[in-house]
Image: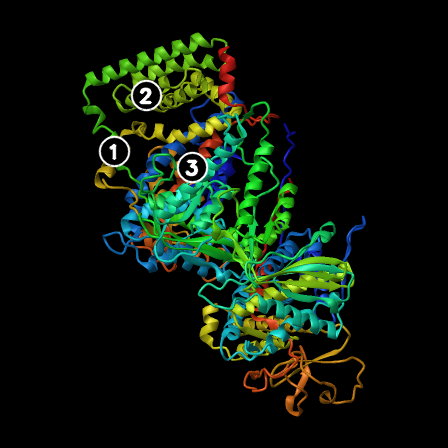
Amino acid sequence: MSRIEAKKPSLCTDKPLTKDVVSFSLSVLSGIVKSCYGPTGRLKQLHNGMGGYVRITSQSSALLGGLSVTHPVLNLLTASVKNHISRFSDCGLFTAILCCSLVENFQRINFESSTVTKISRHLLSSCIDYLKSEACGCRLSVDFDSIKTLLSLVRSILASKPACMLNKTEASYISTLILKAFLLTIPHSVETNVVLGKCVIVPVKDKRVMESAVYPGLLIEIPVFQLASIFPVKRVSSSTIKMALFCISLSGDLSNIGDGPVIVHHGISLEVAVLDQLLNLGKQLVNDQVGLVVCQKVIHPSLKQYLKEHRVITIDRVGLSMVEPLSQMTGSQPIAALHSLSPTCYGSLKDLRTENFVSKHFWHLIPNDILVCSLILCNRNEMAWDELKHVCQTAEHVLQLTIKQPLALLGGGCTETHLASYIKHKSSTLSTGILKAIDCSQTQYQLVADAFCRSLECVACCLEHDDGEILTDMVYGHFWSVQSGFPSDCNWSDLVLKCGCGIYNNQRNLNWTVLQRQCIPFIPQSCSNRPSVNATDHLVLDCFTAKCSGLQVAVETANLILDLSYIVEDQN
Amino acid sequence: RMMVACVSLHHHMTGDGAKTFIILLSKLLRGLQEILDKREGSPFCEAIQRRGRYQKHHCLKQISQSLMTFQTHILDQITAEDLRKHFFSAFSSLEGEISRHTMESILEAYFCGRIGNSHQKLLSQLSCDFYYRCVHFKNGRNEMLNLVNDYFVELHFAVPGLPVSNSRILEGLVLHRDFGVYCPADGDIRMLIVTESIHSDLSASDLEFVVNAEVQYQASQVWFTKRTETIMKHLQSNNIKVLLSSVKQQEIVIYYAKISGISVVECLSSEEISLLCKTTGISPFVPTRDNVRCEITETMVAKFCRPIVLGSKRYVHLGLTRTCAFQPHCVIFCGPVHGVTEQHASAFQGAFKMLQQLFKAVDLSDKCAAQPENPNNTSEAVYCSLQYSSQQKLKMENNSCNGEKINNQQLKTFPAETEKHQTYLQKSSNLVMPIVKLKNDFMFSALIDRGHTLRELQKFKYPSEMGIKNKSEPVVNNHRICNDAMTAIENTSTSVVSKHLNTTKDYWNPGNPIIPFKYEKSYNHTIQSYTSSVIQAGSVLPVGGNFEMLLHYYLHSYAKKCLQPKITVVSTVIADALLSIPKILHRTTKKNSFTQVYFKATSALQINNQLHMNQQGLESVYCKYQLVASVLHCVTKLLTIDLIIAIRRLPQKTEDNDSEGDL
């Protein structure tokens, strides 16, 4: 029996946000996430003092997963960002930064939290309405006829993760590979229920990035000792190989005899009986002209030998994760019986080859209908590989989300500045009816809206880490950055080249100002009326679904944090 | 801890009013403390001339008794007579339909106090939708609400990481599992529930398997496989498309299911299974030798059965066709973090508990029926026989107890108590009710194992208290002993006390004659004039402390009229405590400061007007009524404790103590 300890009273904190500890740790956290943001973001090394695994990263998922946050307020923040990442994989840093700066900015104006909540909710809903409306000036519809937009999307994701250590050619090579792999997983015939295939990432570390490749079908590694005994596969026809997929153990163990006692008479060996069954199974497989037997678990050596004698290739120990893609691409049912197999459960392959890749050897299973592909991913070292693998998964997820909702937002800070100028304009032309409905005054609304816009612009500002100047134009409301060290007397228009997302080049009449400086509200113009939008090559784009949700989550979490007036901690 | 337990019990029942409970409780206790401090002139302490230590305790005792009396009679009476005319009915017509607008305002008022103001509107809309989509016809309302409350865990789903605005209601049910096998099917889908493994193994825990030959082993393996195959084929021929299983099925079952085109969902919780059974009215299927051949009747039909991705996981989404009052729907709560979804879910459930309470009525008709028309009219003979029998039983009980446990300290009180009890019985000879009740008590306690000393003691307690009340002077000695015994019991096992205090009400209710006759008459009169109920189902009042203010007003006026000084004091205290709630509610807004609101209300009441209600939301009167009753209960409970003994070990079960005592 465990000892009963006296219960400690709960710890109660009043007005947690006014405490110095909270505001300090909040500013530390926001400092960390802000410095990671964007293509020029600074990397963070995560390790513990006891030694062990070191990770260099700028990704929010790795970062927040590695940080141990103790204060409940910060816990709330990181938990909501982590939850967001687990849903969308992308825009984690965006959410975290926006949330931090919203909390900071709202705290500064020092209103009653219910007023702030009401107004910021209204602001949020007008943002979301704007982003979802046709008139939205900072979104593009993704054109599936050309791969340009999709490629830009993938490239932006890769570019924003500097810890992958990719140069420009490598980055564009990998983005092409990722896109190619993704396109392979889309089924040819589209029915009502589209089930996407799977992209299996095969790790090859310590190799140049440019040696990465995509193979249609699956790659299964061959153990070295089996290499000697490779023989051509038995085919039903020139382009069909019959295969059987087993999801039970074929090792001859007596697993399914139940949990009661089994009495075996002297001289009777159950092992022999099972082996007999296995060999019978082998006979049936041979009779059914099966050319390849794949087993999730172990195959008994005798059965292997028997099948080999009859020129049937066996692959065992493929693991549970491979079973689903295997059955998906070959159409075979995972078999769970040792006898009386139904002929319908066999699948078919187009071809079976061996591939050599550096020092590794793989079976290459090529299906008729390609739904599954293997991406061999190389990077120089373990840390960079981990980062790259993560990016590939993020990119795949983003592409899947984009297929569901074929929209993309302008990246490179342009969406944030555009949205901020839209909100500024909107809040300056607010009708009194709305104010009455929210129950606040014009000045209150204006102040909260300003704080909101400042937070949005703050996210954009985080893209610049090298003391450069950040500008915004008064026509489109886009993001322009100027490198530091410019002479003070020159004109802005001589310095800027391209806006953050790359959609606009330097034009004469754009009327720049420094971001976050007070200026007259204007209606930001839309970019989508430009015919050449999709033709532009190197756009920076963000995932629409992920960013919209990130925006909402950030505002909701900030409201939640501001609403805290007590923290009760159980100390037991 | 006991207070917290009381609050959570109340909250669990009504889903509302936990905060009000605490405020009210603390105010009441403070009010009572003041009375004790004053002491002189207080009607509770006049008659007592004893040594200091017991005096205070006795005061508390008296107070708690008056509180009990108050709760059972005066509260009901006031609600019935005075408050009733202020209630609105939530039902828009006589058929008991409830309009959407009213529903919304009730729910909005409810969520107002439960969650942050940014999501109130959304959640009240959501729950309102849920209500109207689930309830199909009005007669099934209570059934539906009960079902929703019982199976709320299965009927909601939390998805963290999405904005709150993504919360929605889905048609059909979502099972908290993924498909073991998914075979898409169209049209009406027949489904089957199994609770056992379909494939049986060679041996089971209570069956042993003897292997005589290798061939035999192989043959039996084949036979079992064939059997599983036959069952699955049988299911297929019965056009069953989905198999819902509460246990994990073996791989071979999955394999044959896939071949036969049957989807399988495994490892469903027993709650989910029982929810499915309840909504569809079917029972699980057990494959046996006999029914493998015949047609399967216990199936349910779904409009669809498909995978649904919520968050990052895949679940099973069933579109069941309705067979009972509950139209299956489920709620999906989204929020940035788990805590938010959890809070919303519990608020949502609370709302439905509150609705459940809303449609209840406080029914006095039962009590009326139990009460004989008039004690005086009952024939003497009947009374005598009753008395006789009860005394006999009493004696019998005593004998048995005494004989068994002479050494038991607690039992020393028995003789004294019984004596007193008997005198009481003789004294209150013109009252039939207590005796009837007593008889019941003893019948009941005779049924209980004799070893349960504590229980019996408790049983004795109440009648003895009645006796004291009935006599003009308390019997000091007996009472002291009684109290000592009681506190001893209470300290050793609070669990038992709480259990029994719950039954206190039952014993007190029939004890109507305790009230002076005048009141009883008026009380009876009240009952006759409102034969149906004190609070009708669906009664509502606007929010903002209106209930409390009304009750306060009427309690005050009652206290002025009241002739019993004890009751007067108690009612005043309660009335003042009640007022603290509107005080707090109107604390912040400057326009409606408390004094103004209060003044308006009282002046309106003085000229017998309806209150001017400007608030939007409505709240259930039943909940409020229940709240006041619960608080009074809690106070009574607290006051009967005079000493708290901290113990190292957990309080032992009474059964253990008794068995030791028996040996």
Mark pair 2, 1: CA separation: 18 Å
Q: Which residue is mark 1?
A: B368
**Nearest the eye: A498 or B575:** A498
Q: Residue at x 47, y 77 (%)?
A: A431
Q: Residue at x 57, y 36 (%)?
A: A274
Q: Element under label 2?
A: helix
Q: Which residue is mark 3?
A: B632
Q: Element under label 3?
A: helix
Q: Quadrant of the C terminus of chain A?
A: top right
User: What type is the residue that disc 1 sits on?
Assistant: Cys
Mark pair 3, 1: CA separation: 23 Å
Q: How many numbered marks have been drawn onto this rendered protein structure?
A: 3
User: What type is the residue that disc 2 sits on?
Assistant: Leu
Residue B150 visible here: no
Q: Is residue A564 left or right of residue B564?
A: right
Q: Are marks 3 and 2 on the same chain?
A: yes
Q: Which mark is residue B438?
A: 2
Q: Element under label 1?
A: helix
Q: Are marks 2 and 1 in contact (CB under 8 Å)?
A: no
Q: Is residue A473 left or right of residue B303?
A: right
Label located before the other in sequence (3 or 1): 1
- Chain bearing mark 2: B
Q: Position of residue A561 (x, y in %)?
A: 60, 58
User: What type is the residue that disc 3 sits on?
Assistant: Leu
Q: Residue at x 76, y 67 (%)?
A: A165
Mark pair 3, 2: CA separation: 25 Å
Q: Is residue A203 left or right of residue B281?
A: right
Q: Which quarter of the picture shows residue A446?
A: bottom right
- Chain bearing mark 1: B
Q: Residues within 10 Å of mark 3 (few under 14, many from 20)?
A: many
